[in-house]
Amino acid sequence: MEHKVTLIPGDGIGPEIAAAARRVLEASGVKFQWEVMEAGEAVLEKHGTVLPEAVLESIRRNKVALKGPITTPVGTGFRSVNVTLRLALDLFANVRPARNLPNIPSRYENVDLVIVRENTEDLYVGVEHMVGEDAAESIKIITRKGSERVVRFAFEYARKNKRRKVTAVHKANILKCTDGLFLECARQVARDYPDIEFEDRIVDNMCMQLVQKPELYDVLVMPNLYGDILSDLCAGLVGGLGVAPGGNIGAGVAVFEPVHGSAPKYAGQNKVNPLAMILSGVMMLEHLGELEAAARVRQAIEAVLAEGKYLTYDLGGTAGTSEMAEAIARRLEKG
C-alpha cells in the first residue's frame, strides 16, 4: 500500500533533516507518495504568511503530514506556525515519547514515558489584555469536551500500546475551577478503563517525582501549559530535544514533527542530528499501521547508535546529518 503524506521541510535546518528522514523512511520499504509543501520564512514574501492555506488543504486531503521545524518571524505579529496548525486542524493531542536510546548521554536509565498534552486550550488560546498600564490579564480556558477527549485519547493510547498506567497532572488544589474540571473529567473517563491503573499528581510534585524516580511513571496526560513544560523536562531525562519526536493528533488528521527549533545558524552545514525528525517519522509509521517497518527503523537507529561510528557532533561523533541518515538506511536495506 502506498501512503500519501504531506511533507513540509520547513526552514533553517528543516530541509536537511527532512531529507534525512525521507531517506530512512523510504529505506524501510514502505511506499510513500510525498506531497512537498513549503512553509516558513521562505514563503512569507510571496504569500504574506508563513503558513499558506494550500499547506492546510494538503494536510486535510492526505490526513497525515511529516513536518520539519519552522521559524516564526520575531516582532511581525505572526502566530507560531505550530500553534496555528494545531488550532486550524483541531490537533487536540500532542504526543511526546521520552525513551532512553543506546549511546545517548543521560543521567537516567530505563526511562520510557509518554506525555499526552492537550493541544488547543488553556492559556495558549491567547486571550490576554492589559488592565490599565500596570497589570496584564490572561484567561485560562479549560472545557469539559477538551479535557474528556484528551484524557480518553491517553487511555486509548495506553491500551493500544500495552501501557500499564495513566497519570493525570494538574494544579486543582489551587485552580479549583479550571484544573478542577480537568481532574473531574479525568476521573470520570478513567472509570471506563478498569484494565489500566489511574492516578493523579499535582504538577509541582510531578516535576520532583520525574527527576527522582521517572521509572514509576508511564503515560502522563495534562493541560496544555503543563504539557509544554513537562515534555521538555522528560526530553532532558533521555538526552535532550535532539532525540525528542512528537506527534499532533486530531480526529482523522495527524502531523508529526521534531520538538526542537529550526536552528538557522546551522542551516546548510550538514551538521545537525536528524534523530528527532527520523523518530517522528517512526511515530508516523506507527500511526499509518506500518508497525513492522516502524520496529525495523527503531532497531536500525539503535544499532547505529550502539556502533558509534556515524554520530553527529552533538552525540560525540564527526558524521554529518546525511551520513548518519545513510548509515541508518543501509542497516534497513541490509535487513
Image (cartoon, grey):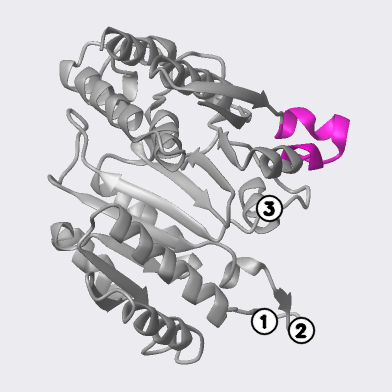
Q: Report x, y in % for residue 89.
A: 66, 54
Within 10 Å of disc 3 (Cα), the crowding (few <14, some 14-19, many 20+) is some
Within 10 Å of disc 2 (Cα), the crowding (few <14, some 14-19, many 20+) is few
Is residue 47 located in the magenta-colored stretch of the structure?
yes
List the residue tagged with mark 2: 132
Pick out the residue farthest to the front: 1
The residue positioned 80% from the left and 34% from the top of the image is: 44
Q: Nearer the viewer, mark 2 or mark 3?
A: 3
The residue positioned 52% from the left and 38% from the top of the image is: 261
List the residue tagged with mark 1: 135
Secondary element under disc 1, as helix, strand or loop, is loop
List the residue tagged with mark 3: 84
Question: Upstream in the sequence, badge 2 or badge 3?
Answer: 3
The residue positioned 43% from the left and 83% from the top of the image is: 185
User: In the rendered structure, which amino acid carries the disc numbered 3?
Assistant: Thr
The residues bearing labels 3 and 1 have C-alpha atoms spaced at a distance of: 27 Å
Q: Start and end of the magenta stretch?
A: 39-55
User: In the rendered structure, which amino acid carries the disc numbered 2?
Assistant: Gly
